[in-house]
C-alpha cells in the first residue's frame, strides 16, 4: 500500500523559540526537502514524525500516513524509516544480520535470509551477507543502511542528511540510488539537509528554515 505523508500544523519549540511551523503533504514517490542551518530544527522535525522527540522540545500538530494518524503511536508502530548521516550498522553483526534484524518476525529463517540477500543484490552487494560491516566502503555501508531501512517495509522515508559525510562523487551516486528506490517503492520522502545540491537532486518543493 502506498500513501501520502501528511504534516498538519506541526509546531516545535525550544523554550520560547519556535523552530518549526509546518503543514505539508508529500505524495508517494515524491520528496519534500527541508533546508536550514544547524540548530534550525531539521532533525527535530524528523524525530517528531518518527516518534523520538524528547524534552526540552515541545511539539504539537498531527502526522498522517494516508488516513492513518500516527501522532500518538509508539515509534515502532509508525512505519517510518529513518536514515541518518552515519550508516549506524551494528558492528557485532554481519552485513546480512543487520538486515535480518529489521525484517519483521514471521516466516522461517530461510525465507527471511532470502529477503535480505535479495535486498543486498538489488543494492549491488550480492554475496555480502557474511561480510563484517567494518570492511565496507562508505558507499557500500550507505547502501546497506538504506536496504536495512527498506526491508522493514516503511510507509514513509525520513532522510536526516544521509549524504553529508560522503565525498562529492559518491554523494551523487548514493543520492540517486536512494531517490530511485523511493520512487520504485512509491514512498513519500522527507529530506532534511543544509546542502543545496541535495535539494536540486530531490527535485521537489523546498521549505527553508531560518
Image (tube, grey):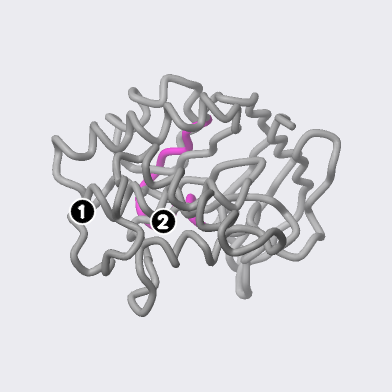
CA distance for labels 2 and 1: 13 Å
Q: Residue at x 33, y 75 (%)?
A: 91
Q: Residues within 10 Å of mark 1 (few under 14, many from 20)?
A: some
Residue 42 position in % (x across, y down): 48, 50
The first of marks 2 and 1 along the sequence is 2
Q: Residues within 10 Å of mark 2 (few under 14, many from 20)?
A: some
Seen in the picture, residue 75 relative to 55 is either above or below; the reply is above
Residue 52 visible (yes or no): yes
Seen in the picture, residue 158 relative to 173 is either above or below; the reply is below
The C terminus lies in which quarter of the figure?
Answer: top left
Q: Residue at x 48, y 52 (%)?
A: 116
Which residue position holds label 1? 138
* Disc 1 element: helix
Which residue position holds label 2? 84
| Residue segment shown in magenta | 32-43
In reply to whether residue 75 is colored magenta, the answer given is no
Q: Residue at x 75, y 39 (%)?
A: 65
Q: Residue furthest bottom?
A: 92
Nearer the observer, disc 2 or disc 1? 1
Q: Quadrant of residue 178?
A: top left
* Disc 2 element: loop
Task: Give the number of marks.
Answer: 2
Foreground: 85 or 107? 107
Foreground: 56 or 80? 80
Q: Residue at x 29, y 38 (%)?
A: 174
Amino acid at each position: 500500500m502506498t500513501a501520502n505523508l501528511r504534516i498538519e500544523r506541526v509546531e516545535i519549540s525550544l523554550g520560547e523559540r519556535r523552530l518549526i511551523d509546518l503543514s505539508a503533504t508529500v505524495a508517494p514517490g515524491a520528496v519534500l526537502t527541508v533546508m536550514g542551518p544547524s540548530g534550525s530544527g531539521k532533525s527535530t522535525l524528523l524525530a517528531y514524525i518518527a516518534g523520538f522527540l524528547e524534552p526540552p522540545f515541545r511539539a504539537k500538530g498531527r502526522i498522517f500516513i494516508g488516513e492513518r494518524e500516527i501522532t500518538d503511536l509508539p515509534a515502532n508502530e509508525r512505519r517510518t524509516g529513518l536514515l541518518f548521516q552515519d550508516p549506524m550498522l551494528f558492528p557485532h553483526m554481519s552485513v546480512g544480520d543487520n538486515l535480518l534484524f529489521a525484517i519483521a518476525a514471521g516466516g522461517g529463517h530461510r525465507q527471511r535470509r532470502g529477503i535480505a540477500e535479495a535486498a543486498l543484490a538489488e543494492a549491488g552487494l550480492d554475496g555480502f551477507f557474511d561480510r563484517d560491516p567494518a570492511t565496507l566502503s562508505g558507499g557500500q555501508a550507505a547502501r546497506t543502511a538504506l536496504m536495512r531501512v527498506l526491508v522493514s517495509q516503511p510507509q514513509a522515508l525520513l532522510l536526516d542528511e544521509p549524504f553529508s559525510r560522503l565525498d562529492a562523487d559518491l554523494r551523487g551516486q548514493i543520492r540517486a540510488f536512494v531517490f530511485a528506490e523511493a520512487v520504485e517503492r512509491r514512498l513519500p520522502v522527507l529530506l532534511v539537509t543544509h546542502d543545496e545540491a541535495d535539494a536540486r537532486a530531490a527535485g521537489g518543493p523546498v521549505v527553508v528554515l531560518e
